[in-house]
Amino acid sequence: MSREINNNVLYEPDERPPFLLAAGLGFQAVMGMLVAVAAYVTIIVHTGGQNDSYLSWAVFSAFAVSGIVIVLNSLRVWRFGARYTLVTGPSAVFVAVCAIALREGGPAMMSTLIIVSAVFQLALTAKLSVLRRIITPTVSGTVLILLAGTAMSVVLESMSDSGSAGPIAAGPITAAVSLGAVLALRLFAKASWQQWTPIIGIAVGCTVATMFGLFDFRGVTEAPLFGVPELAWPGFHLDFGVEFWALLPGFIIVFLASTINSIGEGIAVQRVSWRLPRATDFRTIQGALNSVSVGNLLAAGLGTVPIALYPTNAARTALTGVAARHVGMYGGIILIAIALLPPVLAFLVAIPGTVLTAYVVVMLGLMFVEGMKIILQDNIDVRRATVVGVSFWLGMGFQHDLIFPELLTGTWGTLLGNGMTIGSISAIFLTMVLEIPHLRRQRLNVSLGFESLPEIDGFLRSFATKAGWNESSTNRLRSAGEETLSSLLQFGHYEEAKGRRLAITAHLTGRTAELEFMATPNEENVEDRISYLSELTQVPDAEEVSFRLLRHYASSVRHQKYHNVDIVTVRVEGSRHVHSESLSEVG
């Protein structure tokens, strides 16, 4: 049976659609994010107590940086860029920490915190393969629901404060109508209309706000047609006091969460962009994350808020069927052009806070549910449920001063007052505790070559003996190891593999052995090659024999490709000796 072809894909990433189609879809992609960018930047700046001059500069800079990163991701320069259309911009994950940073130390402190966090993001991306056991789906989901919970309190506070202008009922009515419009679109509109939810929902809210006199158009009419706003660069905060060190863990956690979200989005985009299914290429994800990190360094240099991949890229690609990277190139250029149109920016800045926050509330609600979905898809058991529950409620307790509030004053109050930080650290720590039993994995480090096969075979035989496996299961494990080595070497690339190393780890879960082969990278993907086998003739060539045998011996094969390492995970089902099973039952 051949692999299912995705006929919905009209243009794959490297195919070039007609100019008008690509440019039109690029315009549509960035139009859908205009209001979202304005909403997040405005809420952060206003909640942080900054003036309108800085707000105009921050919005302009956010659009310019986002456009540059979108263009960069449609290309690939060394390890920067993904060659996919990936819309990027300010995100709800940054609302809470950036608003607090602005309130505590102003734009200069926020810029310094972003620089340190962006460098951390670059380092994390380079070592993405090393963190795969700690940054688990359970941790990822917990961080997301914590982000939604902590950001929601900031957003709702902003909504209450922004409703003070005009008649007393103006704020609540405007917020209610805006929220109702967004909910109606999300609940009842067709998929083709839902991508326009931000624009339609905000338009309805602005109409009501205008009726109450809450929308000030003077900035729009007085703005020049073309140019940049008045420079409001804040510089950098180099006084690394208590406030800086208290806020830094929160920024690190948020950038970690942003990275996790981007990994998930990168995987999803690759799945919907090709007619024939492909294994995930984590080098592409690393390229996208590197581009975002560069964008964050640029955002810090300009004094605006950080950016992240938006969670709508995969849905938009699946909806239009056009995955061509030229869509992103044109979209990024259009976004940069929009940043140079002051009337458009002035209109976005003038949108009342009650309208913007009503939209963000829905987005945070979806973020919370997305976090729960990630957790539930990780085969949650009692241990993982404990990690999630304890971490979430610890975070909420500290966020709302419910845990020893009389002790959390001064420096300690600043350090422990961010519930997202406390909850995320708790989730990571408890996950590391769960990993302790797996530290007993058996390990082998050899050169990457056929000359290491006897040593690998002895290692696997010893592992099977300690597990009490019978001869048939032992031979199957040894054969799986041999064929994995052959698959990595790809026969014809044997000479190129000389001087490289291969690390093998093995551990037992129930009756399943999990082998992990970590080698320096090459261009072929074992998982892809195995999936191609069903499309070949019944008499395969010599290069395919190893892949067929590996598929026969292993119950599952997963190949993750990173810039710095290839990781092939092979699972082999085994059976114990009858005598060993009897002893186990007696024990």
Image (spheres, grey):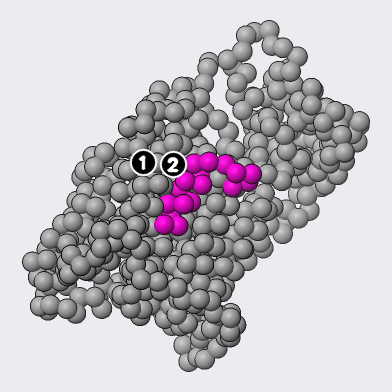
**Range covered by the magenta-colored residues:** 64-80
Mark carried by residue 329: 2
Q: Nearer the viewer, residue 164 or 32?
A: 32
Drawn side of residue 244 relative to residue 201, left or right? right
Callout 2 amino acid: Met
* Mark closer to the chain start, 2 or 1: 1
Q: Is residue 493 above or below residue 340?
A: above
Asked where in the image residue 135 lies, by quadrant, the reply is: bottom right
Q: Pinpoint residue 77: horizontal percent, then vertical percent.
A: 60, 44
Q: Is residue 79 magenta?
A: yes
Drawn side of residue 357 relative to residue 2, left or right? left
Residue under the point 25% across and 78% down:
161
Can see residue 298?
yes
Q: Pinpoint residue 372: horizontal percent, then vertical percent.
A: 43, 54
Q: Main secondary structure of the magenta part?
A: helix
Dot 2 and dot 1 residues touching (CB under 8 Å): yes
Q: Which residue is mark 1?
A: 26
Q: Residue furthest left?
A: 211
Q: Is residue 473 above or below residue 294?
A: above
Callout 1 amino acid: Gly
Residue under the point 40% across and 23% down:
7
Classify mark 2: helix, strand or loop. Answer: helix
